[in-house]
Structures are given as structure tokens and as C-alpha cells.
Image (cartoon, grey):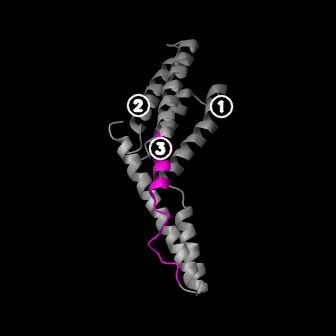
Amino acid sequence: MKNILVILFVVISLIGCANPVQTKMEGIKDTINELRPKAEAGTLKWSEYYQIIVDKMKTLPSTVADRDAEIQEYYYGIEIAKKYESGLMSKEDFYKWREDSNAKSKERGDKFNKMKAECEYEAVSRANPNSSVEYAGNNINNKMASAISGGYEIAMRRNEIFTLCMKSKSIGN
């Protein structure tokens, strides 16, 4: 029974671990949500805001869809913000640029979310719920171990299908 609990703990730990890329992306979103109000209030320079976001975006793997386009847009944001901060650009022009930039970013995000949803659906529908692990016999420990192994196998297959799908959709983006 002790072995079953150890196996259960390991499987739950492996399945429950968040994807490192998704964790980084969530961290970037959190940083944006934390720092944007400071930049809007004037307690943080816009150029510093964009630089912090660029630095965080660079930590993402280059395989992430639209990563480079987003980084390029934030680099451009640094330059535009410096013009605004030095008085070479009006507040209205700066905020107009921000509005357009945010619309482009939202469009890329919506496209990514659509791809992600399609790949999640494909992964769930293609991962065979009929595991190769047998659930035979009367021994409850063996049945439990088989159920855990089968669940882990399906989860791994779903993750593999999802990853392959996302990679295939990211080519050329």
C-alpha cells in the first residue's frame, strides 16, 4: 500500500506540474497587470515599463507563437515612450500608438487562444482513453496501480499531441 501511495504522489506531481512556458507567460501577464497602472499613473516611466516586459519576454523560448513579434513591438514601445518622455511626441499621439499597439497584440492573443483551444480539443479527442494497461484481477493494489499508470499514460499522450499540434500551428507565424 505504501508503494501505491508513493506512485500516486509521483504521478499527481508530474501531471499537476504546470507547463514552464505557461508559467512564464502567466508571470508576464501578472507583471503587465502590476506595472501598467503604475505607468499610467506616472510613477513608472513608460520606457521602463516596456523594458521590463521585453526582458521577461526574452525568457520565453523562441518557439512560442508570436514571441518575436511581441518583443519587437515592445522594443518599438521603448523608443516611442522615450520620444514621449522627452517631449518629442504629444500625449495624444503616444496614447494613440498605445491603443493601436494593444489592438494588434490583442489580435495576436486571440489568434493564439484559438490555436490553443483547437489543439486542446485535438489532444483530448485523440488521446485514447483505452489505455494499454490492464485492469484485471481482484487485487485492489494492482487495480489501483493500473488505474494510476493508465491515467498517467493518457495524460502524457494528451500532452504530446497538444505540444505537436501547437508546434505545427506555430510554423510560419
Q: Residue 37, image x and y in percent?
A: 65, 31
Q: Can you say whether 110 is above or below 124 in the image?
A: above
Query: Which SS class for mark 2?
Result: helix
Q: Can you say whether 14 is above or below 173 in the image?
A: below
In what quadrant of the picture does the N terminus appear?
bottom right
Give the mark nearest the N terminus, 1 or 3. 1
Give the mark nearest the N terminus, 2 or 3. 2
Residue type, mark 1 in image: Pro
Q: Observer-nearest residue: 108 or 130?
A: 130
Which residue is disc 1 drawn over? 37
Q: Can you say whether 166 is above or below 70 in the image?
A: below
Residue type, mark 3 in image: Glu
Residue type, mark 2 in image: Gln
**Residue 164's disc number:** none
Q: Residue 77, image x and y in percent?
A: 48, 26
Question: Where does the magenta region start and end?
Answer: 115-136
Query: Which SS class for mark 1?
Result: helix
Q: Observer-nearest residue: 137 or 53?
A: 137
Query: What whole-number distance in Å separates the C-alpha atoms at marks 1 and 3?
Result: 33 Å
Q: Which residue lies at the image location 50% right of the left edge and 35% below the top edge? A: 109
15 magenta-colored: no
**Residue 72's disc number:** 2
Q: Observer-nearest residue: 5 or 99?
A: 5
Query: What whole-number distance in Å separates the C-alpha atoms at marks 1 and 2?
Result: 22 Å
Res 7 → quadrant: bottom right
Query: What whole-number distance in Å separates the C-alpha atoms at marks 2 and 3?
Result: 27 Å
Query: Which SS class for mark 3?
Result: helix
Which residue is disc 3 drawn over? 118
